[in-house]
Amino acid sequence: MPKETKAGLYQGTIEKDANGNYFCGPYLLDYQIVEAYFKLGDRVSLKSIIKNTSRMSMETYPQKSIKFSYATENHDND
């Protein structure tokens, strides 16, 4: 289960796998949103997590987030 925080359901940095998928921890991130507003290494806070229905990535990432924002840095490092 994701750790519930005041800033969102999960926080971490944006990474990209060998298949070109953007992810944060175990969660797939919406590709178009990352391309438009974020860059690799940005720290984000996931606001909602849904089931991933894409056949191409659902085995690796069973859940995804389409609502996420920059994480605020008002806590100790993980």
Image (spheres, helix red, strand yellow):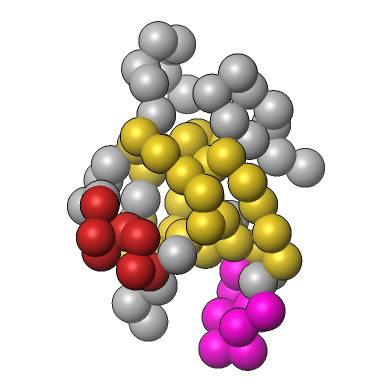
Instruction: Please give the count of numbered marks on the rendered protein.
Output: 0
Give the percent coordinates (x, y) of residue 17: 37, 70
Q: Is residue 57 magenta?
A: yes
Direction right: furthest residue = 1
Q: Position of residue 14 (x, y in %)?
A: 35, 50
Q: Residue at x 65, y 71 (%)?
A: 52
Q: Residue at point 25% right, 64% down?
A: 35
The spot of residue 38 in percent (x, y) is: 25, 50
On the image, the x and y values in percent for residue 26 come to 58, 56
Q: In front here: 20 or 30?
A: 30
Residue 13 shown in magenta: no
Is 76 situated left or right of 59 in this image?
Answer: left
Quadrant position of the N terminus in the picture = top right
Lateral position of residue 54 relative to residue 50, left or right: left
The majority secondary structure of the magenta stretch comes to: loop
Vertical arrangement, residue 50 with respect to residue 17, above or below:
above
Residue 17 in view here? no
- Quick check: can you spot residue 65? yes
- Write the start and end of the magenta stretch as one range: 53-61
* Residue located 52% across and 63% down the image: 28
Question: In the figure, residue 19 lies in which quadrant?
Answer: bottom left
Left-right relation of 67 to 1: left
User: Eyeballing the image, is 1 above or below 60?
Assistant: above
Q: Is residue 36 left or right of residue 16?
A: left
- Asked whether 57 or 54 is in front, the reply is 54
Please report the residue visible at 33 percent of the width from the left and 77 percent of the height from the top.
Answer: 20
